[in-house]
Image (cartoon, grey):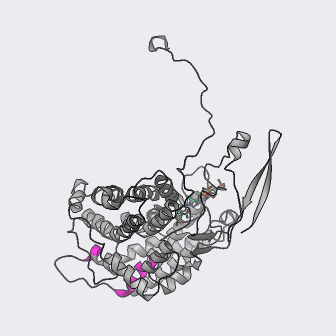
Amino acid sequence: MTESKAKLSVDGKDIELQVRGGTVGPDVIDIASLYKETGTFTYDPGFTSTASCESKITYIDGEAGVLLHRGYPIDQLAEHGDFLEACYLLLYGELPNKAQKADFDYRVTRHTMIHEQMSRFFTGFRRDAHPMAIMCGVVGALSAFYHDSTDITDPHQRMVASLRMIAKMPTIAAMAYKYHIGQPFVYPKNDLDYASNFLHMCFAVPCEEYVVNPVLARAMDRIFILHADHEQNASTSTVRLAGSSGANPFACIAAGIACLWGPAHGGANEAALNMLSEIGSVDNIPEYIDRAKDHDDPFRLMGFGHRVYKNYDPRAKIMQKTTHEVLAELGIKDDPLLDVAIELERIALTDEYFIEKKLYPNIDFYSGITLKALGFPTTMFTVLFALARTVGWIAQWKEMIEDPHQRIGRPRQLYTGETSRDYIPISSRS
Ligand code: SDX
């Protein structure tokens, strides 16, 4: 990997900074010595030009619309593999052979139950609590039940905690859904694969046999793969920062869930479907396109635009294909929301505003239509995103903890507040 120098002049003092290249993608200027050498900080609040870490897990080329997990293109992983294979790849760095895959599936499957006492935890929430609020609470409480795998210095405990998170998130997500709709919890079944088990825990009821539709289970599994990891996005950066203090992995994942909930991030899939419902008909699209372009109007096209992708999000293309497969399997001939989405995309991609700002559909644009067709309420959409992204958060957390140069993350600031001034007794204040 290349190394060179960058020259910088600050207040007449010339310094040289090391430039490092990766295997692919932009080089970085190592500014770690900048403050010591010049007494100045860099300033980049949205991290638009800042690499927060070195990583080997996921690579994104936003201009070309490329997404690689450990070097494998997302479309190939989504087409040929399953979610637990993608989990193994993200965690261990290589695709598993048959024996490794069978062992990993076996181990994950046998960690899917949660401590029975946790089921009483749910009764503390109002029935109408947003499932993401329940996820934040219950996942954060996992360290109260599984403190035997919170010693982050022990590689074995790190792996046990990783497996527990991947295995238990579907169970917790399904329980959040069942609690939300007032139905009894359904236990995981070891004879079902990961996605089928999740659908069964969500949609089975005690009064009759529930047979999982294999086409829908495959679509669910593919949706999990598409959401598994995505470089240093906001929630992953949150997990890394929380983990840099030595906090236990369950607490770090809970922090990631909280960050993902925002409508600018993982909450966009719920917001995008609500937006399509609000638009309602293709006749109303022009009004909403105008609103999205009006800087005085806070309305944005949810599911459109991306900090990194300045081309079509490769996941959105696969999601769109999955949407059509699910609607066809369910015999849904004309979904008015899909009609609005397709027409909205067509108009936006030909509009100068969106072209000039390189705004394309992202993964959240079509996912909501698919998840609604699968039977999930919009309040569950971000929960499903969190379920799938848990492996990415865990893999990135593990990579950071295992980095011998890892230190606590502690950014500085540009201070523009009051300078030092003396206290005034309240009797003397006007
Ligand atoms: C995810 O980071 C990741 O990898 C995230 C993610 C992952 O897998 O982890 O990919 C998942 O979060 C996808 C993004 C989901 N969010 C949305 O769909 C919400 C709608 N999108 C926007 O809020 C926005 O595009 C962001 C938040 C996604 C990106 O914001 P940026 O990079 O800070 O871009 P910006 O807000 O500075 O916008 C640049 C310009 C602005 O116009 P100007 O001020 O330059 O004139 O584009 C405009 C914005 O007003 N713009 C939009 C728009 N998105 C950006 N205008 C209308 N509709 C939009 N959706």
Which of 277 and 134 lies nearest the eye of the viewer? 134
Q: Taking the image as drawn, is residue 336 in sight? A: no
- Which range is magenta? 201-223
Is 37 drawn above or below residue 122 in the view shown? Answer: above
Q: Residue at x 31, y 78 (%)?
A: 197
Q: Residue at x 29, y 73 (%)?
A: 202
- As drawn, is 411 to the left or to the right of 332? right
Q: Residue lying furthest top in this view? A: 428
On screen, residue 256 versus residue 413, left or right, reads left
Judge by depth and name the residue closer to the eye, 77 or 403.
Answer: 403
Q: Residue at x 58, y 65 (%)?
A: 55
Residue 251 point in image, percent of width and height: 39, 55
Foreground pick, 72 / 202: 72
For ligand 1, give the image quadrant.
bottom right
Residue 325 x %, y %: 45, 85
Can residue 222 be seen in the rendering of this structure? yes
Asked which quadrant contains residue 6, the reply is: bottom right
Left or right: where 149 falls relative to 22: left
Q: Quadrant of residue 181?
A: bottom left
Asked if the stretch drawn in magenta spans residue 355, the answer is: no
